[in-house]
Image (cartoon, grey):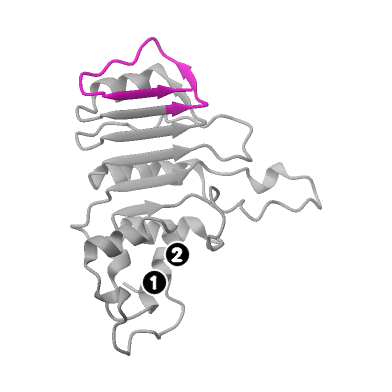
Amino acid sequence: MRNPGETARGGGGGEDDLLSALPDALLNHVMSFLRAWEVACTCVLSRRWRHLWATAPCVDLRLWGGRGHLRPPARLAKFAYRFLLEREVSAAVDTLRVMSSPVSFSDYEEGEEPSPQVVDYSACDVETWIRAAIKRRARVIHLTGHPEDSDFPDLNHVPIISRHLKHLKITGFSLEDRTLRQISCHCPCLEILELKCCLLDGREISSTSLKSLTMV
């Protein structure tokens, strides 16, 4: 498969630089600070980097949250499917960071310019990415509500069921009793649960493995 961030051939013909000589574990750590589309761009740095994106353990698809990042691709949904679903089959997704779907273009008045952060992915896309990360044995999942959406997104159609998940952070979502019960009963290794600015519609959160619970 052609690399998702590749627009032209180049960059891979010369000798590897000192950064490329670092071990994979350290390079993966460096890439964990980048958005997914920035990770994809590293494929043109040198021959060593050409396929590293396909095994990057951290997949960060957040649009907001930090200055100095490149703008996301205009067709983010298509990019994310290729980056997350067409990576190396054996490569686990250790960490997924994703933001809920943004405000629809239809929500803007005629002649009003939408934010450049409003792009073409839906709640169904986000749900698919979460399922893919859980299937790929994700240990850390961070979910954030889109700042331009006045409604609280929910996880009603995503089964939060995983024996690998250790850290779950959810910000700005509506969590019903069914989702809270899944987190409590079907994530036997969950150690850290952070619920920030969430609407909770459930009776309790109970877990024998939980070491840290944050609710603000």
Task: Say whether residue 126 is left or right of residue 22.
Answer: right
* Residue 49 shows in this picture: no
Q: Disc 2 versus disc 1: distance between alpha carbons?
A: 7 Å
Mark 1 surroundings: few (<14), some (14-19) or many (≥20) residues within 10 A: many
Q: What residue is shown at x 57% (from left), y 55% (from top)?
A: 67
Q: Residue furthest right?
A: 111
Residue, disc 2: 38
Quarter of the image for residue 83 reads: bottom left
Query: For the view shown, which residue lies furthest in the top direction?
Result: 203
CB-based contact (under 8 Å), mark 2 and mark 1: yes
Q: Is residue 86 above or below residue 49?
A: above
Kindly tell me whether residue 169 is visible in this rendering: yes
Q: In the image, residue 17 lies at what x, y percent? A: 32, 81
Query: Which residue is painted at 47% across and 29% down in the image?
Result: 154
- Per the image, label 1 sits on a secondary structure element best described as helix
Pinpoint residue 132: horizontal percent, then vertical percent.
31, 47
Give yes or no for residue 211 being in the magenta stretch.
Answer: yes
Q: Residue furthest bottom?
A: 14
Q: Is residue 137 left or right of residue 200?
A: left
Between 56 and 115, the one lying in front of the other is 56
Number of numbered labels in the structure image: 2
Residue 169 falls in image quadrant: top left
Segment colored magenta: 195-216
- Quarter of the picture containing the N terminus is bottom left
Residue type at the position of mark 1: Thr
Look at the image and say whether residue 99 sits in the magenta stretch. Answer: no
Residue that numbered label 1 is attached to: 42
- Say above or below: 122 vs 171: below
